[in-house]
Image (cartoon, helix red, strand yellow):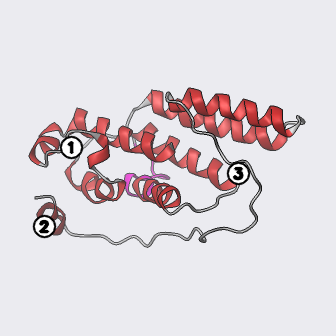
Amino acid sequence: MMQRILEEGCYEFAHRNIPKLLVENNWTCPELVELSKWKEVLPIVIPPGSIAQDSSYTLERGLLDAVRIRNAATHRHLCNNTEIKKMAEQAQGLMSMFGDVSRQNRFLRLSDELSEWDHAVLDPDTKRQKLELVLREISERPVDDMDWTPNSVSLQEVTPVKHVRLDSDEIMGGME
């Protein structure tokens, strides 16, 4: 769900700021552009002043975090509540840079609910029902039945992604 919301946010940002690029590459919907492609392209092609950026969290860092979120989802990394909360906060930061208040608020709501999950003195079924309700609200789509079975073994460790900087010729050449 976070991956999908991030893809939609990147696409909408590009649609507002660089629509010509979308047309030139025949990117007609969010699903046609991987988050890793946005990581390569956006820092180079967005017009100056298009993002609200503070010195502590850069566009490059936000997009790298988005790719890590995508990788965790795609490769089905088992993440604990703390890791998911951190991902929601990172996604919230990227949406903040894009000026996407709606998606920023969805990630904030998820982060808040995950914090409450850790501190709530409720039975597991009540906690689960509350989280499912928030996920339905955030997703704006039906939430599939989730497997809530505890699993102590990760399918794969979540590791930091190495940042590789390509020059603009490599990126623009790869977009044709």
The label on residue 169 is 2
Q: In which quadrant of the rendered image does the C terminus lie?
A: bottom left
Across and down, in percent, residue 58 comes to 42, 53
- Say left or right for 175 vs 131: left
Give the mark, 2 or 3, whose residue is nearer the N terminus: 3
- Mark 2–mark 3 contact, CB under 8 Å? no
Q: Which residue is mark 3?
A: 81
User: What's the CA distance linking mark 1 and mark 3?
Assistant: 36 Å
Residue 159 placement: quadrant? bottom right
Check disc 1 and give the amino acid type.
Answer: Pro
Span highlighted in magenta in the image: 53-62
Give the label, 1 or 3, closer to the camera: 3
Q: Between residues 46 and 117, which one lies in front from this camera angle? A: 117
Give the mark, 1 or 3, whose residue is nearer the N terminus: 1
Give the mark, 1 or 2, whose residue is nearer the N terminus: 1
Check disc 2 and give the amino acid type.
Answer: Asp
Across and down, in percent, residue 79 comes to 65, 58
Across and down, in percent, residue 96 comes to 45, 37
Q: Secondary structure at mark 3?
A: helix
Check disc 3 and give the amino acid type.
Answer: Asn
Give the label, 1 or 2, closer to the camera: 2
- Say left or right for 147 vs 20: right
